[in-house]
Amino acid sequence: MDLQNKMFRLWDFHVSHSKLLLRCSEGDGRNIDMMFFGVHYMSLPNFIHGLALDEPTTDDMDRVRAVVGDRVKNSRLYVLCSKGIRHLILADDCIIEENDFGPMETNFRPLQRALGA
C-alpha cells in the first residue's frame, strides 16, 4: 500500500482505551486507516503528508524511553517519516486497512456503526 503520496490526519483518539486513528480520506469515498492500540506515547502533528514507515533507531528509542521509561520493553515503536521528520508512536499494536467508512465511523465504534448512529 503506497502511503507516500497521501495526506493523513489525526482523526480520533480515545484516552480511556489509548486508541489512535490516523486517516487518509480519499476523494472517492475510500479511506486508509492506521489504527494504533495501547498507545503509550505519540509525537506527531495533526496532518502528515508523504508518509513512510521506518525502523526505530537507538536515538528514537532513547528519546521515548526518557519519557515513558520501561513501557518501551512491552510495546513497539512505530516511526512515521514525513518530509525528513521522524514522528514516533509507542503502541502495543497497529493495523492499517482500507475502508469506506463515513467521517463519523471508525472501527473503534463497531456498536454505534451497527446501530446506525
Image (tube, rainbow, N blue to C red):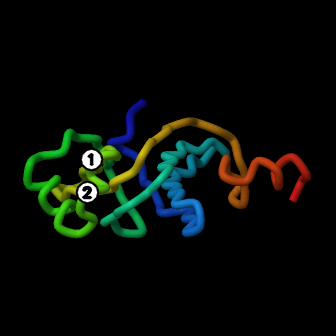
| Residue at horizontal 40 percent and vertical 64 percent from the top | 47
Q: Is residue 37 above or below residue 17?
A: above
Quadrant of the image containing the N terminus: top left
Q: Residues within 10 Å of mark 1 (few under 14, many from 20)?
A: few
| Residue at horizontal 50 percent and vertical 38 percent from the top | 95
Residue 64, quarter of picture: bottom left
Classify residue 89 as left or right of residue 116: left
Query: Dot 2: what SS?
Result: helix
Residue 94, quarter of picture: top left
Q: Is residue 71 above or below residue 47?
A: above
Quadrant of the image containing the C terminus: bottom right
Q: Amino acid at mark 1?
A: Lys
Q: Is residue 32 above or below residue 109?
A: above
In the rendered structure, find residue 70 and report the number of the disc placed on it.
Answer: 2
Name, please, the residue furthest toward the front: 70
Query: Residue 77: where, in percent of width, then height?
Result: 28, 48
Q: Residues within 10 Å of mark 2 (few under 14, many from 20)?
A: few
Disc 1 from disc 2: Cα separation: 6 Å
Q: Is residue 84 above or below residue 75?
A: below
In the rendered structure, find residue 73 and report the number of the disc placed on it.
Answer: 1
| Residue at horizontal 72 percent and vertical 60 percent from the top | 104
Q: Amino acid at mark 2?
A: Asp
